Amino acid sequence: MPQTIKAKSHVLAVFDFDGTLTRHDSFLPFLRFAFGKRRFIKNMTKLVIPTLRCMRRKLTRDELKEVLITLFLTDVDEAWLKAKAEEYCDRYWTHLMRPKGLMAVAAEVSAGAEVTLCSASPMLVLQPFANRLGIKLIGTQLESVNGVLTGHIVGHNCRCIQKIRRLESIYGSLSNFHLKAWGDSRGDYELLAAAKDAHWRHFHPAWRSRKRPLAPLHTKHLGDQR
């Protein structure tokens, strides 16, 4: 059970990672980088049927992600994967990160805000990025037993309403903060709806920022989503 911490600032700035601070998804490219092209393709072919089931709504996105994690990360040494995550961050930082996003994170840190990433990607993979940004990290937690990954996640995939619940488990009631949030996908809707200062695809080219889901979301009570 996460311990509630006392933030030093009344401003809580929360950034989604994939697609918001990055130019594209980071987890699948990481898996290809870590395991190599041959094994990556072999495992991805096993995802064809689960993906089709997801498209037909026979499988949820969270369940599909668990299948992906099971395929790649069962019986994987945790220390090895951490080392690969560090290497991935060092090698692809410039290619992956959006410069305007980096500037926004730095501005919030300089202003004294409590700043965190909040992502559906595994924390183990994103920790080097959070360290380099100098901010905190909330993400999907991978289960590990005696230093070996089991291929399962702890709790829930950190997306949609789970982002709110994870933030509240650490910071307490979000109503105590001036919450600022940046996101770019369906998995960020609840987070953006809860924010007093919400930014939808803020670092994207203008043509990709046109669809703004925030207005209709703010008309619904978050309790309906819980």
Image (tube, helix red, strand yellow):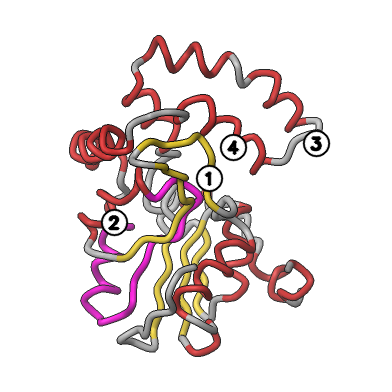
- Which residue is labeled 1 in the image? 153
Q: Residue type at mark 3: give it.
A: Arg
- Which residue is labeled 3 in the image? 57
State the SS at label 1.
Answer: strand
The span from disc 1 to disc 3 (Cα, nearest Å) is 21 Å
Q: Nearer the viewer, mark 3 or mark 4?
A: 4
User: Is residue 92 or residue 36 the one in the foreground?
Assistant: 36
- Which residue is labeled 4 in the image? 66
Q: Which residues are magenta?
A: 100-123
The spot of residue 66 in percent (x, y) is 59, 37
Q: Nearer the viewer, mark 4 or mark 2?
A: 4
Disc 4 and disc 1 in contact, CB within 8 angstroms? yes
- First along the sequence among labels 3 and 4: 3
Location of the C terminus (image quadrant): bottom right
Disc 1 and disc 2 in contact, CB within 8 angstroms? no
Residue 74, compared with residue 204, is above or below; it is above
Q: Residue type at mark 1: give it.
A: Ile
* Residue at x 58%, y 14% (from the top left corner): 45
- Which residue is labeled 2 in the image? 130
Q: Residue furthest front?
A: 146
The spot of residue 186 in percent (x, y) is 63, 53
